[in-house]
């Protein structure tokens, strides 16, 4: 994948949980509220339809303010990759103010470990810089920490 440092923010970690379980957490609405936003913020609504063109909708409560994020899945490779965007909503309706496309990959490293990579791809350098200043690395880093802890609690 060709990354553009002016448009793409990248977070990579080794996670102590199996790739298949991490993928399941990302594609199952019952799991999303447990890790998707940094605590103490919360997910108050989640609707996922994990197929190309299917809904990826979440509503967050951030300091008492509700924030809706409606988008669609663009690509899913079971246990390996998912891509979703807020550029479109379900039914391929263009969003009025798209922000980013997320690419999340899960590379099985063996022994229950996964190389987890999250890429936030933006339409312009200004939008990428705005996301960076909003705390992309701390926020998405916290999310992967929460995902790891949650997945370990689910480990089969």
Image (cartoon, rainbow, N blue to C red):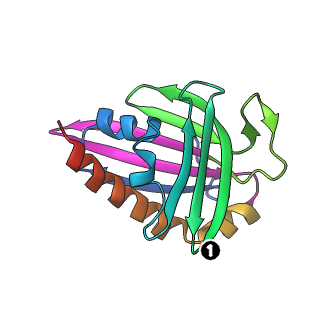
Is 119 one of the magenta-colored residues? Answer: yes
* Residue stretch rendered in magenta on the structure: 102-125
Q: Residues within 10 Å of mark 1 (few under 14, many from 20)?
A: few
Count of all numbered marks drawn on residues in the image? 1
For the point 45% across and 57% down, which residue is it? 11
Asked if one can make out residue 126 in the rendered structure from this viewpoint, the answer is yes
Query: Regarding mark 1 in the picture, which secondary structure is present there?
Result: helix
- In which quadrant will I find the N terminus? top right
Q: Residue 36, image x and y in percent?
A: 46, 54
Asked if one can make out residue 1 in the rendered structure from this viewpoint, the answer is no
Q: For this rendering, which residue is in front, 139 or 150?
A: 150
Q: Residue 3, image x and y in percent?
A: 58, 47
Q: Residue 85, image x and y in percent?
A: 66, 42
Above or below, comparing residue 39 to residue 113 in the picture: below
Q: Residue 81, image x and y in percent?
A: 46, 33
136 sits left or right of 70 in the view: left
Magenta stretch prevailing secondary structure: strand
- Residue bearing the label numbered 1: 133
Q: For this rendering, which residue is in front, 82 or 8?
A: 82
- In which quadrant will I find the C terminus? top left
Is 50 one of the magenta-colored residues? Answer: no
Above or below, comparing residue 151 to residue 156 in the picture: below
For the point 58% across and 42% down, which residue is it? 2
For the point 60% across and 68% down, which residue is it? 132
10 sits left or right of 12 in the view: right
115 sits left or right of 117 in the view: left
80 sits left or right of 75 in the view: left
For the point 22% across and 49% down, which residue is it? 152
């Amino acid at each position: 994948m060709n990354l553009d440092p002016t448009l793409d923010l990248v977070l990579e970690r080794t996670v102590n949980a199996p790739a298949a379980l991490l993928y399941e957490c990302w594609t199952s609405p019952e799991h999303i509220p447990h890790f998707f936003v940094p605590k103490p913020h919360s997910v108050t609504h989640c609707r996922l339809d994990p197929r190309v063109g299917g809904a990826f909708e979440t509503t967050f409560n951030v300091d008492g303010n509700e924030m809706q994020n409606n988008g669609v899945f663009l690509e899913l490779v079971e246990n390996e990759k998912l891509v979703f965007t807020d550029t479109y909503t379900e039914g391929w309706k263009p969003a009025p103010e798209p922000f980013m496309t997320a690419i999340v990959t899960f590379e099985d490293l063996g022994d229950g470990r996964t190389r987890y990579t999250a890429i936030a791809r933006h339409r312009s350098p200004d939008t990428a810089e705005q996301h960076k200043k909003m705390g992309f690395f701390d926020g998405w880093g916290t999310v992967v920490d929460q995902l790891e802890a949650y997945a370990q609690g689910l480990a089969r």
